[in-house]
Amino acid sequence: MKIGTPKEVFNGEARVAMTPDSALQLQKLGYDCIIESGAGTLAGFSDASYQTAGVSVVETAADLWGAADIIAKVRQPDDAELQYLTADKTLISFFNPGGNAEGMEQAKSAGATVVAMEMVPRISRAQKMDALSSMANIAGYRAVIEAGNNFGRFFTGQITAAGKVPPAKVLVVGAGVAGLAAIGTSTSLGAVTYAFDVRPEVAEQVESMGAEFVYLDFEDEATDGAATGGYASVQSEEFRNAQLAKFREIAPDIDIVITTALIPNRPAPKLWLADMVAAMKPGSVIVDLAAERGGNAEGTVPDEKIVTDNGVTIIGYTDFPSRMASQASSLYATNIRHMMTDLTPEKDGQVVHDMEDDVIRGATVTHAGEITFPPPPPKIKAIAAQKKPEVKELTPEELRAQETAAFKAQTKTQVTLLTIGGLLLLGVGLVAPASFMQHFIVFVLSVFIGFQVIWNVSHSLHTPLMAVTNAISSIIILGAVMQVGSGSALVILLAGLAIFMAGINIFGGFLVTRRMLAMFQKS
């Protein structure tokens, strides 16, 4: 079968769904690759680079759609492209099934199979095909770069002969994939970064990246910020009021705001209101990644950059991934290639559309003359953060009683073991000679004391402790050396084995200790 990629017809779209590298991988799956001339030019991939990779270049979109059995593209197809669909074709692209009922009806009428990349379920196995996350990652990174391009000062603080430069203060609203990418970029550039999300479980992720999580003075056990698939859910009016109050409080101190809050198939919630924009310092920047859905900031104009009366720049671009077309194309083409790997289990260039597969079924919106959207929940659900069970704080009296009970139980166990050990030792003493018992008692006491010492050492210290004690305790080699001169062949053999094994203990113990100490030394 042939897989082809047309040139994107959406105005300003620079991405392409197939790169020379991904084409090589698709050919290993048994497919012949086709591309429309000029499809990769804006992303930095020439027709010659595709031809070098074994891809056939055709001149027109009609030629491409006519020759290919599988069409991989980026943007939702327009009416003209939908006319090319037939029953023997499979389309893989962003399709917006939740807001594209007419397109699904056209695909159903044509009998074509449509795989919507934004519908890939968010389960572990499907992460390699998650095009939404790939593009959101780029959008978050690019948002910080755009903010820096429009911000008149440094991100990082500096102390120079000309004076002290304070670091920029950046607030990222929404800690999803785009938000985390923005946080990582902002902190790496040296800005003081704050982040907010309605899901409190992401606070640990935010703080691990060097940002400070903005907590609300709000408690509501019924509030759960996580919805199906890892998205944020709609919050209560009380929560929203507390959130807006917090934003009003910090707005005058923030230099850059990056908003990423977007719930699928809903208008973007208004989070940064006009009074907050008015409270920001002149020269501040707002980058609204939710602009295509109306924006999180009041005053956002989709696809435009505006400057407010008080000198705040609001950026409402909706094509952040396309502004990094080469990188975005590489990631998206890799997502497509992984999808094709799942669709081609035999690697023979033949699509097997297994509707029992969670990923394939979840992403398929039309198939065999039927609309299959919305999909059923995946058999393997996305892993949601579990609330930590509340641990009841014990009163001093309860804590003392618990410690007393534990001490009594431990004492009882030790007394029982000592009693059993004493009885066994007494039994051995009844039949063994006195000279043997003298050494045997010393041996038993040594084992008991050694066990008590090692048992109370933290597990993380066992390896270095055992390495040293192995070397030191191998003083037993002296006893073996003394027995080598014995007249008994059996004693000599046992002494030799003891020397050999004790030598391993000595040299191995010091070698392990040396290597562990070297881990903490600078080269």
Image (cartoon, helix red, strand yellow):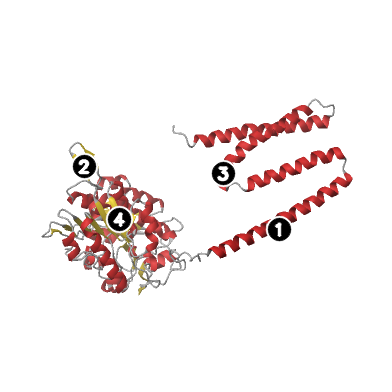
Q: Secondary structure at mark 1?
A: helix
Marks 2/3: CA–CA distance: 46 Å
Nearest to viewer (mark 1 / mark 3): 1
Residue 521 image offset from top left, x and y in percent: 47, 34
Q: Label 4: which residue?
A: 194
Instruction: Name the residue furthest front.
Output: 397
**Type of amino acid at the residue the image marks with label 2:** Lys
User: Amino acid under label 3?
Assistant: Leu
* Residue at the image point whose x is 28% and y is 59% from the top: 74
- List the residue tagged with mark 3: 461
- Marks 2 and 4 sit apart, C-alpha to C-alpha, by 22 Å
Task: Quote the CA–CA distance across marks 1 and 3.
Answer: 28 Å
Residue tagged 2: 164
Figure disc tally = 4
- Disc 3 to disc 4, how far (Cα)? 37 Å
Q: Nearer the viewer, residue 188 or 220?
A: 220
Q: Callout 1 environment at 10 Å: few (<14), some (14 to 19), or many (20+)?
A: few
Q: Are marks 2 and 3 in contact (CB under 8 Å)?
A: no
